[in-house]
C-alpha cells in the first residue's frame, strides 16, 4: 500500500519499537505498537483516483461526509458571494487533499487559530490554510482546517503554480475538515450527509466555464 511521505516517520516510529519489543519477548507491548503502526499506515494511505475529465466539473478535494452544501451565510466565507461545500474527514478517511479544479494558484493564506472539533460549525475559527485558484477567470477557494486531533496542515503548492484537476495538494494530519468556496452560479451536485471521494466525486458544475 502506498503511503504519503509525511506518514513515514509516524509509521517507522511505531514499527521500530514493535520490533524491539518483540525481540525482547514483550509481546503484548509489541502487538500494541504494531497495531498502532498498522493504523498509521492505513491513515496515511495514498490511493490512486480516477479523475473525471468532462469540462466544468468540480471534484471533491477530500474524502469524507458533506456537512454544508449551499449558499454560505457569510460567517465563514471570504468576502463576497459564494456557495460553500464543507467536508468533514474522520480519522478513518483518506487524508490526502486534491485540488477540485484545474487552474493557477493566486494566493495562499495561512491563519493560526483554535483546535476545536472539526465537525463543529464554529471550527472555522481553527487553524487553517486557504488556497485560492484562478479557474479560467473564476475563483475557487479550498480551505484546509485542522481539528482536535489534526495539529498540522501540509500544503504542497505555491503561488503561481498551475494545477490539474484532482492533483494532490497536501494533507492534514488526523481528523479535519475542508471547505470549498465556489462562484454563486455553481450548480451543486451533492447534498448534506453524502460521503464523497477526493478526486472522483463531482461536487458541482461551473457555468460559463471555458474548459476545452
Image (tube, rainbow, N blue to C red):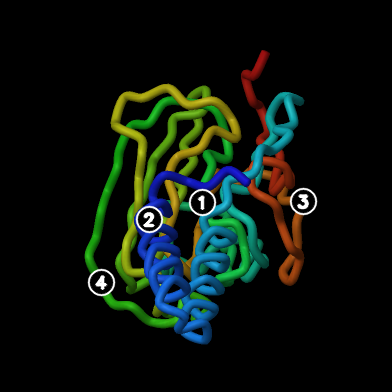
Percent x, y for residue 3? 53, 47
**Disc 4: which residue:** 113
Inter-mark Cα distance, 4 to 2: 16 Å
Q: Are marks 2 and 1 in contact (CB under 8 Å)?
A: yes
Of tags 3 and 4, the one toward the viewer is 4
Q: Residues within 10 Å of mark 2 (few under 14, many from 20)?
A: few
Inter-mark Cα distance, 3 to 1: 14 Å
Q: Tag 1 or tag 2, which sits nearer the N-term? A: 2
Residue 70: name its quadrant.
Answer: bottom right
Inter-mark Cα distance, 3 to 4: 31 Å
Q: Residues within 10 Å of mark 1 (few under 14, many from 20)?
A: many
Residue 189 is labelled as 3
Q: Secondary structure at mark 1?
A: strand
Of tags 3 and 2, the one toward the viewer is 3
Percent x, y for residue 150? 39, 69
Q: Are marks 4 and 2 in contact (CB under 8 Å)?
A: no
Residue 60 is labelled as none
Is residue 147 visible in the rendered structure shown here? no
Identify the residue at horizontal 36%, vertical 63% (top origin).
Answer: 13
Question: Which of the image's four quarters has the C terminus?
Answer: top right
Inter-mark Cα distance, 1 to 4: 20 Å
Is residue 194 visible in the rendered structure shown here? yes
**Disc 2: which residue:** 78
Identify the residue at horizontal 46%, vertical 37% (top origin).
Answer: 139
Q: How many marks?
A: 4
Residue 181 is labelled as 1
Inter-mark Cα distance, 2 to 1: 8 Å
Instruction: Give the camera-side residue of 141 and 152.
Output: 152
Q: Tag 1 or tag 3, which sits nearer the N-term? A: 1
Amino acid at each position: 500500500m502506498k503511503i504519503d511521505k509525511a506518514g513515514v516517520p509516524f509509521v517507522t516510529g511505531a514499527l521500530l519499537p514493535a520490533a524491539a519489543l518483540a525481540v525482547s519477548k514483550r509481546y503484548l507491548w509489541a502487538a500494541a505498537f504494531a497495531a498502532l503502526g498498522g493504523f498509521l499506515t492505513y491513515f496515511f494511505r495514498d490511493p490512486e483516483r480516477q479523475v473525471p475529465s468532462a469540462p466544468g466539473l468540480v471534484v471533491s478535494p477530500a474524502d469524507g461526509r458533506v456537512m454544508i452544501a449551499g449558499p454560505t451565510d457569510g460567517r465563514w466565507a471570504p468576502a463576497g458571494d459564494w456557495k460553500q461545500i464543507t467536508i468533514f474527514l474522520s480519522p478513518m478517511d483518506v487524508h490526502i487533499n486534491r485540488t477540485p479544479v484545474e487552474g493557477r494558484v493566486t494566493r495562499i493564506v495561512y491563519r493560526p487559530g483554535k483546535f476545536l472539533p472539526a465537525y463543529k460549525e464554529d471550527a472555522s475559527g481553527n487553524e487553517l490554510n486557504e488556497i485560492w485558484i484562478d479557474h479560467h477567470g473564476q475563483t475557487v477557494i479550498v480551505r484546509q482546517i485542522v481539528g482536535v486531533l489534526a495539529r498540522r496542515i501540509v500544503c504542497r503548492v505555491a503561488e503561481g503554480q498551475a494545477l490539474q484537476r484532482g492533483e494532490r495538494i497536501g494533507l492534514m494530519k488526523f481528523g479535519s475538515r475542508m471547505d470549498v468556496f465556489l462562484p454563486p452560479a455553481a450548480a451543486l451536485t451533492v447534498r448534506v450527509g453524502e460521503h464523497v471521494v477526493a478526486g472522483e466525486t463531482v461536487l458541482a458544475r461551473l457555468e460559463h466555464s471555458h474548459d476545452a
